[in-house]
Amino acid sequence: MVAKLQCMRGMVDLLPGQTPLWQRVEATAHEHFRRAVVQEIRTPLLEATELFARGIGEATDVVGKEMYTFTDRGDRSCTLRPEGTASVVRAVIQHGLLSQGPQRLWYGGPMFRYERPQAGRQRQFHQIGLELLGFADARSDVEAIAIAWDLLADLGVQGLALELNTLGSGADRARYREQLVAFLQQHREQLDPDSQDRLERNPLRILDSKNATTQELLAGAPTLADALAPESRERFELVKAGLAALEIPFTLNPRLVRGLDYYSHTAFEITSSQLGAQATVCGGGRYDGLVEQLGGDPTPAIGWALGMERLVLLLAQGEANPAPAPDLYLVNRGEAAEAAASVLARQLRRSGLSVELDASGSAFGKQFKRANRSGATWAAVLGEGELERGVVLLQPLRGQAAEEMAFPLADLAGLLERLKPVAF
RNA sequence: GCGGGCGUAGCCAAGUGGUUAAGGCAGCGGAUUGUGAUUCCGCCAUUCGGGGGUUCAAGUCCCCUCGCUCGCCCCA
């Protein structure tokens, strides 16, 4: 036997039992975006590596070690997108969309990161994301968060928590970064190895460390909140007040530091305790500097990304969807009758019914067995006898009384009238 | 990249060195050549993720490797 082929590590197939749930999530998201007047944008999966290097930040793990990067035949360095924001911003700049005013955009689709897979984390994963570009007001932060919150609530996800923090302006962060590094340098030996490493590369991320002794040490460290300029502080108060006015509950998490470089001011995560180690369902924040950093005019913006796999995990509860039952199962046998059955199946399908046509040519008993198991509401029988009489036999499969009715093949309208109310 | 657990059929699963790898579900064929329940009968792993080794003998022990899984890191 030839060695079995299987999909690559960290890549998964979504089988027919799972796709209905994905479709429901996507349809719900689309509807929420429609109501919020947010338009879809689709960008290529493949981008020049430089886009992510410049946009996300060289110091981040995503860029440093998780990207699917390769050289194409034209010797260009290409990367499979590890997230959506950089591409959206690139497209917006490239096509001058902001000259037409602020943009309210959403995107969806696969993202790629070369990581070790675990619960709620794959190498190819899917995100749905929102980007509001050209909006500076704190109310846009509130609106972005509210859209995510309401979408998740509408889907029926239980046990979610919104965590909120502010990273301040770029100037605030630079100031705080110095204070933090100065403090931590004095206690360098007490830091865990990872945090020591981050002291040079990305010191703010140390705040997020799960190491217990590092966290004890941080208790005495200067806080980001204290380093905020008054305007930044006021801005954050407005965001909190806006969320409170919408009755969206949140908890403040001063250690919430987004991993990607481009965030500023509002940062948030929506998490679930039921997800294991990868608890974040939705993460986002404000990124006022990114558009300019990628070559556009300075533009304030806020956005978030929602992890589809994690969301589906929360909704699935291990339940697989059964195969959908057809409205009608068409039993047929005999050369001429089989040909007529194909025609009939097509006519019925054109009328909107779901019809399973038995193409096996097996004995009637066998076909009926399959008809019954298909879960169909009706069995229709078209054999040589029926064809000669120009009728099709109709039999309800749900009830025990197997009342058979003959309908003229020519009178398709009458047949449909009989079928539709029950077939639904 | 690092650490723990696990790989027997499409799925669940017995088997802890001794002759032919239980069982269940699903599937397929038949009993029933024009009618769906149930039942009954038959079929469905020359092989235990893959490779090497130890042994008279390996699904069972050892090594390597691949994959899955949970966690670290990181993030959605």
Image: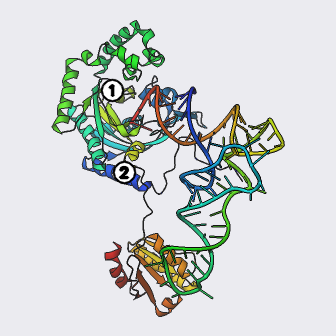
Q: Residue at x 65, y 50 (%)?
A: A4
Q: Residue at x 21, y 38 (%)?
A: A248
Q: Is residue A84 visible?
A: yes
Tell me the element at label 1.
loop
Spot occupied by residue A99 in the image (x, y as percentages of width and height):
30, 37
Spot occupied by residue A234 in the image (x, y as percentages of width and height):
18, 23
Q: Is residue A357 visible?
A: no
Q: Nearer the viewer, mark 1 or mark 2?
A: 1
Mark 1: few, some, or many residues within 10 Å (few <14, many ≥20)? some
Q: Which mark is residue A256?
A: 1
Q: Amino acid at mark 2?
A: Glu
Spot occupied by residue A118 in the image (x, y as percentages of width and height):
49, 37
Display colour scheme: rainbow
Residue closest to the far top: A186
Q: Amino acid at mark 1?
A: Leu
Q: Residue at x 47, y 71 (%)?
A: A373
Discs 1, 2: same chain: yes
A367 to the left or right of B65: left
Q: Which mark is residue A227?
A: none
Q: Residue at x 51, y 35 (%)?
A: A79
Q: Looking at the image, tell me whether mark 1 or mark 2 is earlier in sequence order.
A: 2
Residue at mark 2: A26
Quarter of the image with the C terminus of chain A in it: bottom left
For disc 1, the chain is A
Tell me the element at label 2.
helix
Spot occupied by residue A48 in the image (x, y as percentages of width and height):
50, 34
CA–CA distance in space, label 1 to label 2: 28 Å
